[in-house]
Amino acid sequence: MPFDKYTKEVWKGSVITSPLPPTLVTCGTEEKPNVFTVAWTGILCTQPPVTYISVRPERYSYGLISETGEFVINLATEQLVKAVDLCGVKSGRNVDKFELTGLTREKAAAVSAPIIAECPVNIECKVRDKISLGTHDVFVADILKIDAAKELLDEKGRLALEKSGLLAYAHGDYFALGKRLGNFGFSVRKKNKKRKKH
Ligand SMILES: Cc1cc2nc3c(=O)[nH]c(=O)nc-3n(C[C@H](O)[C@H](O)[C@H](O)COP(=O)(O)O)c2cc1C
């Protein structure tokens, strides 16, 4: 069956993305914590596990991350969408965003920044490099620890993240994830063969 096609207009280079995770990034210390929303994030390397966040230098959080060299990427869910938006429009310079949103901070295993209890996964990161690109600087970071929700572990210990209602952000809008269409390698997999990790 042929697929649908589009005819195109060519525009100058700009940022249009496919869905990204609008994450809650925590930074600072137990005494001076902050949380802000970051959608410019992703994975750079599987082994060693390396991630990045892209941050404008004028953000209050930028200074905190530069001071400690640490932060946590907390994955957000549908339930948290209003908190995600609030943390992305208010600054920790003027307001305590934990108080404002009601999000609960807890001690992380390996970094000074707190983790958020309401997020199903917390990714504890240590900065290894900073790249200045223009409007944003990219913090490239090693993933030191993952805090995974016990409630989402199945009997085999697999994290059933699909049950958590993860949020997506595309072209200025927040979305709940839609229906599952397949999994990695399903297009070539023979029936009853095990899932392959990538
Ligand atoms: C959905 C969404 C995504 C955002 N993504 C980023 C991002 O990737 N990088 C960034 O520097 N700011 C991003 N922001 C803006 C910051 O979260 C916002 O400026 C925030 O108020 C900064 O907080 P702070 O001053 O407490 O650090 C985003 C905001 C929203 C609402």
Image (spheres, rainbow, N blue to C red):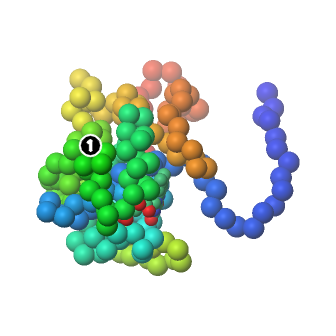
Which residue occupies the extreme front position in the image? 94
**169 in relation to 36, above or below:** above
User: Label 1, on which residue?
Assistant: 102
State the image coordinates of residue 76 (x, y, percent, origin top left): 37, 43
Which residue occupies the extreme top position in the image? 192
- Residue at figure coordinates x 42%, y 35% from the top left: 78
Kind of residue sitting beneath label 1: Gly
**69 in relation to 103, above or below:** below
State the image coordinates of residue 57 (x, y, percent, origin top left): 42, 75
Q: Can residue 72 be seen in this snapshot?
A: no
Nearest the eye: 153 or 101: 101
Quadrant containing the N terminus in the rendered view: top right
Residue count near mark 1 (Cα–Cα under 10 Å), binned few <14, some 14–19, many ≥20: few
Quadrant containing the C terminus in the rendered view: top left
Disc 1 residue: CB within 8 Å of ligand 1? no
Q: Secondary structure at mark 1?
A: loop
Q: Which quadrant of the view contains residue 13? A: bottom right
- Residue at figure coordinates x 80%, y 35% from the top left: 4
**140 in relation to 186, above or below:** below
Image quadrant of ligand 1? Answer: bottom left
Q: Which quadrant of the view contains residue 58? A: bottom left
Q: Which quadrant of the view contains residue 155? A: top left
- Residue at figure coordinates x 57%, y 33% from the top left: 188
State the image coordinates of residue 8 (x, y, percent, origin top left): 83, 52
Could you tell me how many numbered marks the image carries?
1
Nearest the eye: 70 or 198: 70
Q: Can residue 94 be seen in this snapshot?
A: yes
State the image coordinates of residue 109 (x, y, percent, origin top left): 15, 53
